[in-house]
Amino acid sequence: MQDQLKSISTPDSLFHDGNPATGELGTVVTADWLNSMQSAVQSTQQELLAVINSNNGQKADPTRQDQLLQAMRNISWGGNNKPTTLAGYGIAIASQAEAEAGTDNVKAMTPLRVEQALNALGLSGYAKVITSGSLQAVRPNGLYHIDSNLVSGTPDKSNGMLLVNFLNDKWGSQVYWMWGGATYEQRLENGNWQPWVKLLKTGQQSTLADYGITDAASKTDLQKAVNDLVAGAPGALNTLQELAAALGNDANYAASITKQLSGKADKATTLSGYGISDAFPLRPPLGAGVDLNTVQDTGIFHQPRNANISTGQNYPAELAGMLMVYSSESMVYQIYLPYDGSNISWRVGYNKNWSIWKRSVDSTYVDTKAKTEADRGRDEAIKSTNKHFPGQLVPMFTSKPPAGLLICNGAAVSRDIYPDLFSAIGTTYGAGDGTKTFNLPNIPDGFAMLAANGTPVGAITQGEIKSHAHATNSSVDEAGGHLHGMNLTSQGGNSNPAGAVASAGYNWTGYNPSPMNIAGAHTHNITVNIQATGSPNNYASGMKVTICIAY
């Protein structure tokens, strides 16, 4: 450590203001004095930081004011000055008045204070036994026996005593004494219950672990560090000041020693062993019948079997693979990688509403030996590798379409879940409920016809057949055979005598009409046979497939 800071060079070693009335000047602070002051302060800080860092590698925290105190206590407790009382460890003990008032939520209570608090409540050993409901709903303030097998919300599945103290419905606390000695405390802060905190474990507290302290150096660790630090030093170097002088007031002493100690300290086997608490955790494998909508804990999950997916729900593919989940407030992100490396699918859940799975990378369409930014999956690559465009008609040889396709059956679907498809076709095939849904095209059994100029997309064309001729056979039946009657009347005569030969110059006189009777009105039947072939439906020859639309 640097020598003591020199006093200011004035007769009384004090600073003085100037006096304009007398012309007296104020104390002049020289650069030399300021530099020496800066050096002294820095040296002192380095010494203090070295002590703080010796407390299990603790770093300076400007928001705390107890780091030096903790470091000194750890150094002291590693020797022969280990405290023998709770107060010696800095644990505040409630006074009798505080125990009886029951208003303090911070200080611990000894058995005597607990007895005094119980006496103040006047329970006299007749506390009520709680056998149903939630522990957090116990009212009014007081002491209760708890049957943990019948009551929810206990910190441990062990029976015990519960001390209830509420200021109002939003602020209060509970202290739970488990049979066996462990003590827990829980607080209600502005209507929100905080987790149970273990104050004391069963039996006498003799280690840091008893107080829930897991990241502090043990007595053995500190003793070893001190021994390694002074190993081989002469017996005369028995104080820190002497050691500092022997080390030449090395400003990097703490870093140097920490580096040396890190090479000798036991290596941790887990991330938590190094104090890493925000790493992506590995989660247990997924079994059969798992709905991925319910998998919302941050971490990496493995689905080891294809068969498990057949009984599960909301998987993007029927292939075993790895599921990565990140949860933050009301949002959950999921990424799924099948074991065969064929693609990567992702989706997002917001307030328990999930988007559809989207396939961002597909090995079938991305060159694994790509050399350009687009080939490596940038925006240009994603656009160029899409299999289908929203609104594209896609025939499938499967009865159940894969992700990215919907059957053209006229169903009403969500505008929010399928925004690209809604943007492409709008309400051409139906407006759904008018606000949240729209209808898919409804293509009945038959063909989806192509629309050219003049016929709008979405128009329905009725089935027709091409103009053609049929062969026919016809016949006329025989009917209506009949006779006609005739009336013959002789009238008048001639001027020739009977038996005379007519000759020129003779004149005939009179007439002989012969009328025919009308009869025989009838009809004829004509039969025409048209030979018919084909199906009752207007189908072309071919195979039936599922008609889908891409979204």
Image (tube, helix red, strand yellow):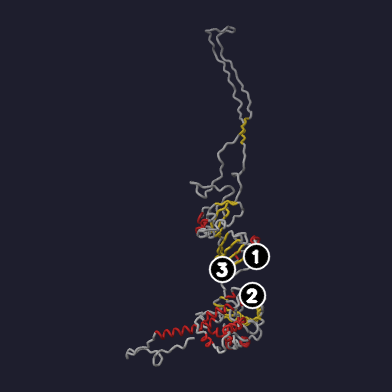
Q: Quadrant of residue 483?
A: top right
Q: Which residue bears the numbered disc 1?
A: 287
Task: Measure the C-alpha gap from mark 3 to mark 2.
Answer: 27 Å
Find residue 527 and report its horizontal and vertical position in percent.
Answer: 62, 33
Of the numbered discs 3 and 2, the one sitting upstream in the chain is 2
Report helix, strand or loop for mark 1.
Answer: loop
Amino acid found under the numbered disc labelled 3: Ser
Say which label, 2 or 1, has the lower sequence index. 2
Tell which tag, 3 or 2, sits nearer the viewer: 3
The disc labelled 2 sits on which kind of residue?
A: Ser
In the rendered image, is residue 67 in sight?
no
Q: Which residue is mark 2?
A: 152
Residue of label 3:
327
**Label 3 Cα crowd, 10 Å radius (few <14 / some 14-19 / many 20+):** some
Name the residue: 66% across, 60% down: 307
Q: Residue 56 occupies which quadrant of the picture?
A: bottom right
Amino acid type indicated by mark 1:
Gly
